[in-house]
Image: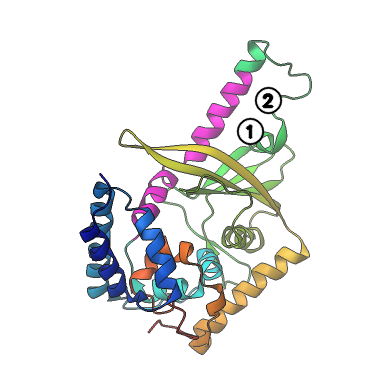
Amino acid sequence: MLITEKQKKYIEALVDQLGYKNSQFRKDYLQLTLKDSESKESASNVIEELLATLEIRKKSQRRKDLPEHTIVTDLSEFEFCPASFAIKKTFLIPKSSAEMDGTELHEQAYVEKFLTNLYLKRARDVSDKKVKNEDGFIYRGLYGDLLKSKIIFRGHQEQSSPFVSSRGNLKGIPDYIFKRPDNSYFVVEEKHSWQDEITNPWKSDIVQLLGYLYGIKEYRMEYGYLIYFTWYWHYGKLRTKNPRLFKVQKNETNKALVTSTFKKVNALKSNGKMKFNIGEIHPPKCYSCSAKVVCKHKAGKEEVLHFPYR
């Protein structure tokens, strides 16, 4: 059954209460919301989520103390959206349902399971003589680098301590550090998304990976990998599909990128404010962001961002 007119009007009223009233952003955001509400049942779920969002907004709590140190994920969050970064550092914001689904898979250390299955499949193809291993079939391509290397650090483990940069001004815990047969090292970051098509790594994820490459002093690393999985629900269980692997190198351009982001983050924390570029507001990105519950910048009317957020 299709969404009813009553449900549609109620959704529009709830969206207005979130602060999108009388703006082009409201039009775009509402279109995304109604797209998720095409049936009567899905519309009910969207209404419940909007009501929960409004409740979170009313009860949003400020953090008692602002974190002193800059962590690598701060760089990623800032690159994703400076407003989202400031909000999440100021308020205790619950994760969105999409973020919780991604986190659940991330905490399962899915990369290790995927690589084990990939190795077994390739080895089975060789054993069954479907392919020849003369050209290194099992270890071919980018995945081959991971398959023939050993994991020496797992950031998913509770006892994992953060790495600290040589100057002591950046901390972080990567997902994995691999050791190659030639005793060189590389870092791997695991990402889970609801999007089916990711043809290039997201800039915010690149910045995060670079933060580890340049910030970790214990292991000299010249490159790392971002691996994306698309998650979906199948008979009540979270599943993944469509793995995509991207290699990120150390070079002057990438060094300038992560250095610039680090300086911007610390400038905002030090100065307490910065100019906010309203031209970079992107409704689909805001739609999936948990910080939207208290964000005043999403409607494109605020040109100054304060830290702490206000």
The vertical placement of 144 against 230, above or below, is above
Amino acid bearing label 2: Ile
Q: Position of residue 38 (x, y in %)?
A: 33, 50
Q: Front-most of 56 and 132?
A: 56
Quadrant where the N terminus sits is: top left
Residue at (66%, 33%) from the top-left corner? 148
Q: Which residues are magenta?
A: 95-123
Q: Main secondary structure of the magenta part?
A: helix
In magenta segment, residue 185: no
The answer to whether residue 265 is seen in the rendering is: no
Residue at (32%, 63%) from the top-left corner? 94
Q: Residue furthest front?
A: 5
Q: Position of residue 214 (x, y in %)?
A: 66, 62
The vertical placement of 50 against 123, above or below, is below
Query: In the picture provided, is 177 more to the left or to the right than 5?
Result: right
Query: In the picture provided, is 273 more to the left or to the right than 42?
Result: right
Where is mark 1, residue-wise? Answer: 147
- Label 2 sits on a secondary structure element that is loop
Q: Count neighbours of disc 2 (C-alpha within 10 A) and say few if under 14, some if 14 to 19, many if 20 or more.
A: many
Where is mark 2, residue-wise? Answer: 138
Q: Residue 63 sits in which quadrant? A: bottom left
